[in-house]
Amino acid sequence: MVGLLIADVAGKGLAAGLYMAQLKVIVQSLARLHHEPKEFLIAVNKVVSANLDGKSFITMLYGVVDVERGEMTFSRAGHCPLIHVPADRPPGLRKARFLTPDGLVVGLQIDDGTMFDSLLEEQTITLGPGDLVVWFTDGISETMNEAFDCFGEERLAQIVEQYAHLPFDQLRSYVLAELRDFAGAADQHDDMTMIFMKVDERR
């Protein structure tokens, strides 16, 4: 089993950085105790809600890959969707799909956690040889140009489905080049994080 997590703290600056550092310790501890994504995020929310500033929250997506079974189970707490590009077609003809199980952001002090627990969904997908899964933060999809238009999730999906067959360094270069071309002279307003995960075709 392999666990993957991507998260984004609302806000910027020192406070957001400190929350992310604390979150790293929390998730490393709880991942040893909770092996199912939904169960894990519920546990994280309980700890974070009790300690986070009431004005802040964290988006998070956690997945567990069963390498032997070729499956990934994941839950999404208000984070950007996953993009899955199955390798069931030749390069250039592959179709990306968005994976969007329901879930509230982590840390909202609405109630005792009942709403978070009840809305959080867990999803399992089959991963075939050559499949690509893209994890990203909204710093990617909400990159703005000088007209204040957003790059968008659909545009990102189109790029990764077109170049999904390439090695990661080339795929990353294409995505970043498209982001730079789109933004033009506009300032970068948020940090950008992206994770590429591909199933080894030699499995």
Image (cartoon, rainbow, N blue to C red):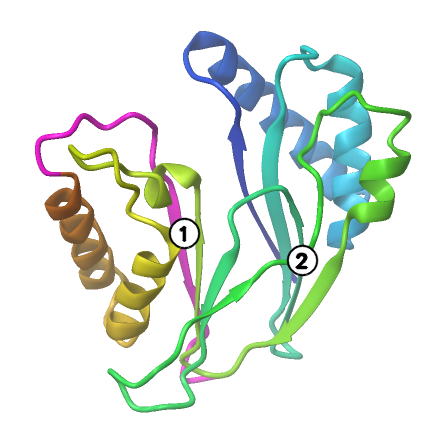
Read off the magenta span: 184-203
Foreground pick, 37 / 80: 80
Q: Amino acid at mark 2?
A: Pro
**Marker disc for residue 195:** 1
**Magenta part, dominant SS:** loop
Tell me the residue at 27%/62% (across/down). 168
Q: Is residue 6 above or below residue 90?
A: above
Q: Residue furthest front?
A: 147
Q: Amino acid at mark 1?
A: Ile
Which secondary structure lies at badge 2? loop
Where residue 90 appears, as percent x and y from the top left, is 30, 91
Instruction: Give the image quarter of residue 46.
Output: top right
Tell me the residue at 81%/38% (across/down). 116
Q: Which residue is mark 2?
A: 101
Where residue 155 appears, as percent x and y from the top left, is 30, 59
Q: Does the segment drawn in magenta span residue 202?
A: yes
Please state if 81 lies on the left or on the right of 177 as rendered: right
Q: Is residue 66 above or below residue 119?
A: below
Please state if 156 lies on the left or on the right of 28 as rendered: left
